[in-house]
Image (tube, grey):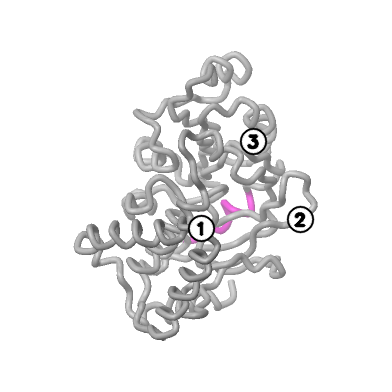
Amino acid sequence: MKSVCLAILNYNGIAHLQHLLPSVCEAAENYSGHCSVLVLDNRSTQPDVEWLKANFPAVKVVIAPKNDYFFSYNWLLPELSEDFVVLLNNDMRVKKDFLLPLAQHLESPDVFAASACSYDWDGTRITTGPVELVFKNGFYGWPFDLSRQETAHTLFCSGACIAVDRKKFVELGGFNWLFYPAYCEDLEICVRAWRRGWRCIYEPLSVVWHREQASWSASPGSRSERLNLKNSLLFQWASLPMDRDRATRYWSIIKILAGFLIKGDFDWLKIFVNSSGIWLKNRKRYRGMKMSSAELEKIQSGIRSPI
């Protein structure tokens, strides 16, 4: 088996790490090949580093040059030597045998990433599944198909637990800074991988539990819904063909805006205007990201193909 690094992103997360690290260390011991465990600390303002060294001395701690949120991985992965890296949020715990099903997929030379089946923290409901791109009312969407719990190709692998081929990640240039500080960066890098001819796979035999958005809430100034909407718009404008059903899209925008304005909620309008400004400022720089309808259909065909 090829070598693996389990890399955990952390910021002021002792309350989460005390649940995650015992399960991750057990998973590393359960793996038949070399497997290291590493915590990438995003400059915690609490004594996380000291706590880690005192309670988990076998776990390597790396301090990021600065808190770049999820994008600290762009700095870390070129510094590693392992073949595969599993990127993990700190607000999780993992099944002891979660790693092997992911690593087996990555052994294939044309696989970029594989992701696990994620349950909520209590284990009462599944929160992930394979993804296909959908088009409705002039906009694209990428919902998890929760009903389809089978090994399958997927448009993208959730960044909360994504196993990547390290060299391919570095070759792609890591996560795209257009989506800083968070949301849609995992989607966009997987789409770039598909465009290279590299596959992404959803594997329900790999199981994790996730306390969703708990680690993000520890980050200063986090506004997850606004960031998600902003980056969802940027991803569509930057990467996907937008010449389909323009009249419906414009009418949808008018209806959405009117609905919020009637309620006195100006957030959607502010986000839409702000996102438009960001895109107009950056579109020349990222014009190479736009794919044609034919290329998108080829990717969709690959996602629908059996493993």
Label 1 sits on what residue type?
A: Asp
Distance from the alpha carbon under mark 1 to that under mark 3: 43 Å
Q: On screen, 112 above or below 132?
A: above
Residue 36, by quadrant, is: top right
Q: Residue furthest left?
A: 284
Distance from the alpha carbon under mark 3 to that under mark 2: 22 Å
Give the number of the mark in front: 1 or 2.
1
Callout 3 crowding tier (Cα within 10 Å): few <14, some 14–19, many ≥20:
many
Q: Main secondary structure of the magenta part?
A: helix
Label 3 sits on what residue type?
A: Val
Q: Which label's residue is closer to the chain start, 1 or 2?
A: 2
Q: On screen, 234 above or below 252?
A: above
- Residue at the image point whose x is 34% and y is 48% from the top: 170
In the rendered image, which residue does mark 3 sit on?
24
- Residue at the image point whose x is 50% and y is 57% from the top: 113
Q: Give the range drawn in magenta.
A: 100-108
Q: Which label's residue is closer to the chain start, 1 or 3?
A: 3
Callout 2 crowding tier (Cα within 10 Å): few <14, some 14–19, many ≥20:
few
Q: What is the x, y in percent for residue 301?
A: 49, 80
Q: What is the x, y in percent for residue 54?
A: 59, 13
